Amino acid sequence: MTLQTGRSAVTPWLVLTLIALATFAFGAVYPWAYLPLFVAATTIGVIGIGQHGVVPTLRPVVVGLALLSITVAIQLIPLPATFVNAISPSTRGVMNSYDLGFVPDSEWLRLSIDPARTRNALFALVALGIYVIGLASLLDARGLRLVPRGLALLAVPLALFAIYSRQDNNGLIYGFWEPLDGGGADQAGPFINRNHFGGWIVMSLCVMIGWLLGKIERVSRASQKRSPIIADEIGAVFLMATAIAFGTISLFWIVSRSAITSFGAAVLVFAWFVIKRRHMGPARQMLILAALGAVLIAAASFRGIDTLARWFVDERSLLSRIDAWRDGWDVVRDFPVLGTGLNTYSPAMLLYQKRNPGFHMAQAHNDYLQLVAEGGVIVALAAAGTVILLISAMRRTLRAASIEARGYWVRTGCAVGLMAIAFQEIAEFSLQIPANAFLFCTLAALTVTPVRSGTPAGVIPRGNIDVPEDSGAALS
């Protein structure tokens, strides 16, 4: 799996620009923002596939994505009413109550109770799938170096904005925009919901920590080989560490329990990777573990241990989620095979919500439960199979990247970020926010970016570039 050189340097900056625009456009939750984002994602993916083909490790993932898309498309196809009644007997009754234009005695029925919403979801699924496959072909070592630094440049002002918006909150985003569905009082930065900012910053922090660990390992290798350490290396470490500190403080400041817990889990996974990594030496490993712990403690102390403790022991939010999950499970029981249609949980709750009076639970606050409710066993199995294939591709790439320093750790940071957001989705729906979904797919593509194979002895791996040990550029 050899990485071709000469890839365009425009790609990482274009990706970072799209991340920034989507993030500051309220997370791209409105059609005027997410439709151009998905079109741009598709364009990048098509260009990557057209120019460089599909990365070999991702070919099984392409098959998984195709099967997943087909299962969702089936929800949109008119099927014989007798067949729909057999596998989804509740569809006719729900449609009769939800759609005023529904013809009860129709001989043909769709499985989706709201085909327009399912079409939007299918478009997003296909667009982001093409984006992951194509971006992995376009990125190279330069991209692996630029994206984490670009995220750090974006994360710092976003973190400060989130802190300010929580302290001086008038219920309006940017001080003037009232969210169309309300909820502005729970904002954080440009995000309408602080938990969604939490998901964004957790993914970004993991990438930044990965980049920082890679830089530390390269400096460590250079010092062991008595190679000169350029002052810029120390400066880069300091600047990235500062960005991580700001991001972590903002994460604790918004008091998102799901995001804080996810980040805590991510730190534990990083600690495990550090302990397994032999290139740093025991002393540096202990220093890194202490630094990770110190960042968590400092951020928690800055926010206030008492404030955090009171919020974490408040069980009202958890109880409301449990009630929402019980309502969601009722949908699963009535639509077990192919669900109500992807992206139709909100209309389904117009009929199925029995709990949490006074609120419309448009999301299940558990994306796994919501996927089963909207897609049934068939779509859920197709999605799980695709995820397993993607994880397999990531593991193969990480094993191949183990000879590297920065390249290995950036990919590891991206993988940990994916794990962290997957953990948060147990009690949240951050990945339903288009900006977060786009960032998630960017991390997935970074993780499976191909590695230059066959690094000979006597070189210091520099990202994906092999540099002789005695080269002064080895640390640039």
Image (spheres, helix red, strand yellow):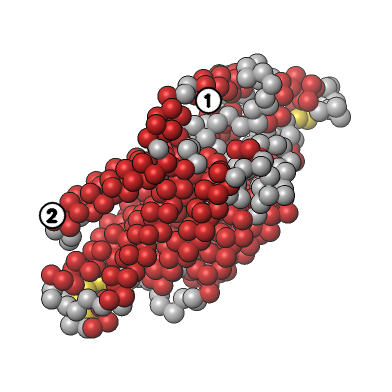
Looking at numbered disc 1 in the image, what kind of residue is underneath it? Ser
Q: Position of residue 114 (x, y in %)?
A: 74, 34
Among the 4 quarters of the image, the one containing residue 376 = top right
Q: Position of residue 398 (x, y in %)?
A: 31, 56
* Quadrant placement of the N terminus: bottom left
Q: Which residue is mark 2?
A: 282
**Is residue 432 something one can see in this rendering?**
no
Q: Which residue is mark 1?
A: 317
Which residue: 72% across, 24% down? 350
**Along the polypeptide, which appears first: circle 2 or circle 1?**
2
* Quadrant placement of the C terminus: bottom left
Which residue: 13% across, 74% down? 225
Q: Position of residue 301 (x, y in %)?
A: 36, 41
Q: Position of residue 153 (x, y in %)?
A: 48, 64
Element on which disc 2 rests: helix
- Check the image and report above or below for 105 versus 74: above
434 relative to 84 in the view: left or right = left
Element on which disc 1 rests: helix
Total of numbered circles in the picture? 2
Identify which residue, 272 or 238, lies in the foreground: 238
381 relative to 109 in the view: left or right = left
Identify which residue, 70 or 452, lies in the foreground: 452
Identify which residue, 336 or 274, lies in the foreground: 274
Mark-to-mark CA distance, 2 and 1: 42 Å
Which residue: 47% across, 21% down? 315
**Is residue 281 something one can see in this rendering?**
yes
- Check the image and report above or below for 92 versus 445: above
Neighbour tally class for label 2: few under 14, some 14-19, many 20 plus, Cα within 10 Å: few
Looking at numbered disc 2 in the image, what kind of residue is underneath it? Pro
Among the 4 quarters of the image, the one containing residue 320 = top right
Which residue: 56% across, 43% down? 166
Q: Nearer the viewer, mark 2 or mark 1?
A: 1
